[in-house]
């Protein structure tokens, strides 16, 4: 592994000195420069000095008190030095801080107080991911599917969206976050491991261990199965943040089935998502619930990422799509036709709808996948083969 060059940005002098000792102690990285002041603008001297140092990694210390300035620094550094990996160092006790740091541009969030081993693992993850990126392109995107109320079709949408993405681009993971996971049943898979195993082994989770917890379907889609007993060992939100950081470094698209799970984990994963698909029907109860779910997910920001998917869509005289948007507060992304026989027989037989070539519902999921990925540079080249199964 080539030696990584590291710049440390920390206002606290003691923390700066400790981090330097730890970085140099990993023996795979060396501190090339340290900064005592945090940048406050793009033209700041600090940014210039870091640019001159041209590091592989920038460690930014995020103090528990007054974290806003450090987060702003992460954002500026990310903007001005987009090729460098930023590792934020802070307290794992504040899940929102982890999300904010990752959204600002940090690729890793490392526990404070930090150990040489924490840093070493993060450096190794970076080098491995960079090798993979060189082969395949940039970090993956997350699409999270939640339902407005139980049974309206979140799992059906998540499973068939994942199958459509896998068929068009490959390297797709489906993560079953539901409190009692059904995705394996929909795909007729018999998982040996579940998400609990991945979370339980986070401290040693690398690409190969992650893959060993996944269950593969015949078309190559990789499922991280949900729990098969309700209420077992609730992981913390910071554990989910670590797991998803790993997933986006590994897969091109990560589809999450959150179904009816409305808790901190779903909110965190929604925050990390490119789009959140809020599935509902066109009835009053669904639309009312959708508005409440949107409010819950939007409490920590990112309301605009939540898009409405009307499943089992049927036209109702006097009720327009604009009415559905007004009732829920979310923009309509997609409508999926009501095809009870096709959907229920596919679930019962464990065959995906996408195998029903040329059916209206298979086309609908292919179109949904296409609409979610149309701006992705890295997949444009693969577009010729798009939705080749329909
Ligand atoms: N487009 C559709 N047309 C007809 N029936 C559908 C459609 N989508 C889903 N269904 C039916 O609705 C049922 C519930 O779907 P699904 O399990 O995907 O919902 P969910 O929101 O994930 O439910 P849960 O709250 O249990 O997680 C399915 O068994 C299927 O028969
Ligand atoms: Mg479900």
Image (cartoon, grey):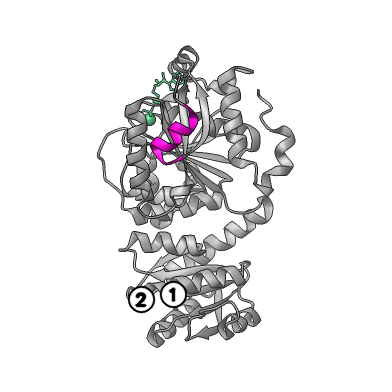
Answer left or right for 28 relative to 229.
right
Q: CB under 8 Å between callouts 2 and 1?
A: yes
Where does the magenta region start and end? Answer: 320-330
Residue 293 % position (x, y): 34, 41
Relative to 385, 311 lies left or right: left
Q: Quadrant of the C terminus?
A: top right
Q: Does residue 390 sit above or below 169 in this rendering?
A: above
- Mark 2: secondary structure: loop
- Towards the viewer: 76 or 158: 76
Mark 1 lies on a secondary structure that is helix
Residue 59, visible in the rendered structure: yes
Q: Which residue is mark 2?
A: 66
Residue at image point 52% right, 50% down: 248
> x and y percent of residue 269 in the render?
42, 48
Q: How far apart are the two marked residues, 2 and 1, measured between alpha carbons?
A: 8 Å
343 w.r.t. 199: above or below: above
- Tell me the residue at 54%/72% (across/down): 76
The mark found on residue 70 in the picture is 1
Q: Residue at x 58, y 86 (%)?
A: 45
Q: Main secondary structure of the magenta part?
A: helix
Residue 327 is inside the magenta segment: yes
Expressed as whole percent of the image width and height from the top left, the position of residue 211 reads 50, 44
Work out which residue is located at the far top of the displayed protein and give it: 341
Task: Indicate the quadrant of ligand 2 in the picture.
Answer: top left
Magenta run includes residue 58: no
């Amino acid at each position: 592994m080539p030696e990584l060059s590291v710049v440390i940005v920390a206002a606290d002098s003691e923390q700066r000195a400790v981090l330097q000792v730890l970085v140099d102690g990993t023996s795979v990285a060396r501190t090339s420069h340290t900064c005592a002041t945090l940048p406050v603008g793009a033209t700041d001297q600090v940014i210039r000095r870091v640019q001159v140092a041209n590091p592989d990694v920038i460690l930014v210390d995020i103090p528990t008190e007054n974290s806003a300035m450090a987060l702003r620094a992460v954002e500026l550094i990310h903007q001005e030095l987009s090729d460098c990996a930023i590792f934020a160092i802070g307290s794992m006790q504040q899940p929102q801080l982890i999300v904010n740091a990752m959204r600002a541009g940090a690729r890793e969030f490392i526990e404070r107080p930090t150990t040489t081993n924490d840093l070493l693992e993060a450096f190794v993850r970076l080098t491995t991911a960079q090798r993979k990126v060189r082969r395949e392109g940039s970090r993956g995107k997350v699409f999270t599917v939640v339902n407005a109320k139980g049974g309206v079709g979140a799992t059906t949408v998540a499973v068939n969206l994942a199958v459509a993405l896998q068929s068009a681009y490959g390297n797709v993971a489906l993560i079953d976050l539901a409190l009692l996971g059904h995705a394996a049943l929909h795909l007729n898979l018999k998982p040996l491991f579940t998400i609990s195993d991945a979370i339980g082994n986070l401290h040693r989770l690398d690409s190969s261990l992650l893959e060993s917890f996944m269950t593969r379907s015949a078309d190559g889609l990789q499922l991280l199965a949900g729990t098969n007993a309700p209420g077992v060992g609730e992981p913390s939100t910071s554990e989910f943040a670590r797991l998803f950081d790993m997933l986006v470094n590994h897969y091109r698209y990560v589809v999450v089935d959150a179904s009816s799970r409305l808790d901190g984990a779903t909110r965190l994963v929604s925050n990390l998502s490119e789009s959140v698909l809020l599935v509902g029907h066109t009835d009053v109860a669904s639309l009312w619930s959708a508005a409440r779910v949107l409010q819950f997910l939007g409490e920590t920001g990112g309301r605009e990422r939540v898009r409405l998917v009307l499943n089992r869509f049927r036209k109702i005289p006097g009720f327009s799509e604009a009415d559905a948007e007004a009732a829920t507060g979310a923009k309509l992304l997609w409508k999926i036709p009501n095809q009870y026989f096709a959907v229920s027989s596919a679930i019962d037989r464990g065959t995906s709808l996408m195998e029903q070539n040329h059916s209206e519902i298979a086309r609908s999921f292919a179109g949904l996948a296409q609409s979610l990925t149309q701006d992705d540079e890295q997949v444009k080249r693969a577009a010729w083969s798009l939705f080749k199964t329909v």
